[in-house]
Amino acid sequence: MIAITLPDGSRREFESPLSVGEVAASIGAGLAKAALAGKVDGKLVDTSHRIEHDVALEIVTDKHPDALEILRHSTAHLL
């Protein structure tokens, strides 16, 4: 079992590895749609990042303090 601890202290358990996006979708469709990235044990990762062991996870949306950094980084790749 993989235990994922969310910022509010709640824990979700999953039987097999899954992506940050899949965790967001398990919480709610709106969150999955709004997710820009994740923060796994304090490190920013893409929503496709696979979680294979117990972690602390934050879902990064446009309201998150790190959102602007992510958007700027992604935009730089387009230029």
Image: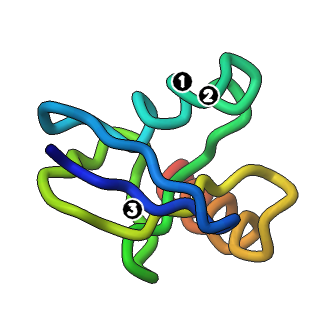
58 w.r.t. 36: above or below: below
Q: Coloured how?
A: rainbow
On the rendered structure, is 45 left or right of 2? right
Where's the C terminus, which quadrant? bottom right
Q: Which label was assigned to residue 14?
A: none
Q: Position of residue 31 (x, y in %)?
A: 70, 32
Q: CA distance from mark 2 to mark 3?
A: 15 Å
Residue that appears at 45% across and 82% down: 42
Amino acid at dot 3: Val
The circle drawn on residue 25 is: 1
The answer to whether 73 is drawn above or below residue 10 in the figure is: below
Element type where label 1 sits in the image: helix
Task: Give the residue number, with chain letter if any, for mark 3.
Answer: 45
Q: Please tell me whether residue 34 is drawn above or below residue 79 in the rendered image.
A: above
SS type, badge 2: helix
x%, y% of residue 30? 76, 22
Q: Position of residue 50 (x, y in %)?
A: 21, 46
Q: Position of residue 56 (x, y in %)?
A: 42, 69
* Picture residue at 31% right of the left edge, 67% below the top: 55
For label 3, count other residues whose C-alpha is less than 10 Å away and answer few (under 14), some (14-19) or many (20+). some
In front: label 1 or label 3: 1
Q: Secondary structure at mark 3?
A: strand
Counting other residues with Cα less than 10 Å from the Cα at mark 1, is it few (<14), some (14-19), or many (20 or more)? some
Q: Give residue 34's quadrant in the image.
A: top right
Amino acid at the residue labelled 1: Ala
Residue at the outermost top position:
29
Displayed quadrant of residue 75: bottom right
Q: CA distance from mark 2 to mark 1?
A: 5 Å
**Left or right: 9 in relation to 13:** right
Return the residue at label 2: 32
- Mark 2: which amino acid? Ala
Q: Earlier in the sequence, mark 1 or mark 3?
A: 1
